[in-house]
Amino acid sequence: MYRVIGAVKSRAMRVLWALEEIGAPYEHVPAAARSDEAKAFNPTGKIPAFVDGDEVLTDSMAIVTYLADKHGRLTAPAGTIARARQDAMTFWLIDEFDAVLWAAAKHSFVLPEDKRVPAVKDTLKAEFEASAAQLSDRLDGEFLMGDSLTIPDILACHCLNWAIGANFPRTDEKLFNYAKNLRNRPAFQAAASR
């Protein structure tokens, strides 16, 4: 049985949701970042950490990609053009959504107060808004990569939810409804209820 270390209201949600979509059994350890419990699995204290047998993996997207590849779900096969396009979308979302939200979090509560530059958050919100408009233009259907949920959908929805919690500007109706539909999936609901 897999083990996921990390609070639901963190990037661990991506891993929990992927496991629910895949239908794989797992144990959830809702450890907070930088807690002793988290440091037992990742010396930096960053979450999530993921245990498969004797192996420990870190970084939510590396874990989700590992699970998708291992179980043959949520992903296009490696070595295909479809997978290259999926990876390009995943990396774009990491650069344009996740990185912007993480920078805003650092300047809100992560960094020591004397290192924070609160004024940068206005620029980050504008960057996110521009990227959200680009994503909305690229969205052509229920999912980002075709007819089924894939890794980029999990990442995009998580980031859109994070943006709401961080008081970023609301996205357009198309993206809002896209994320709302994903949040209504039984696997999302099961992961969020942990």
Image (cartoon, rainbow, N blue to C red):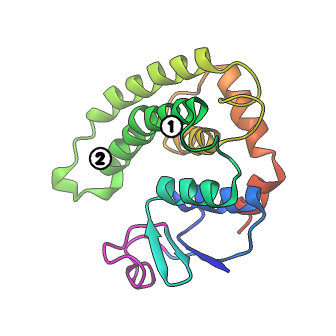
**Residue at position x 52%, y 24% in the image:** 132
Q: What crowding class fits label 2: few (fewer than 14 Cα within 10 Å), some (14-19), or many (20 or more)?
A: some
Residue 189 image label: none
Mark 2, residue position:
107
For residue 38, what is the image quadrant? bottom left
Q: Position of residue 99 (x, y in %)?
A: 37, 41
In front: label 2 or label 1: 1
Tag 1's secondary structure?
A: helix
**Quick one: label 2 or label 1, which is nearer the N terminus?**
1
Q: Is residue 53 visible?
A: yes
Q: Magenta segment: does it hold 43? A: yes
Stretch in magenta: 32-48
Q: Magenta segment: does it hold 142? A: no
Residue 131 left/right relative to 189: left
**Residue at position x 46%, y 69% in the image:** 57
Quarter in which the C terminus is drawn: bottom right
Q: Position of residue 15 (x, y in %)?
A: 60, 60
Mark 1, residue position:
87
Q: Are the residues flagged by discs 2 and 1 in contact, CB closer than 8 Å?
A: no
Q: Amino acid at mark 2?
A: His
Q: Is residue 28 visible?
A: no
Q: Nearer the viewer, residue 73 or 188?
A: 73
Q: Residue furthest front?
A: 79
Q: Nearer the viewer, residue 45 or 24?
A: 24
Tag 2's secondary structure?
A: helix
**Residue at position x 74%, y 59% in the image:** 22
Q: CA distance from mark 2 to mark 1?
A: 29 Å
Q: Amino acid at mark 1?
A: Asp
Quarter in which the N terminus is drawn: bottom right
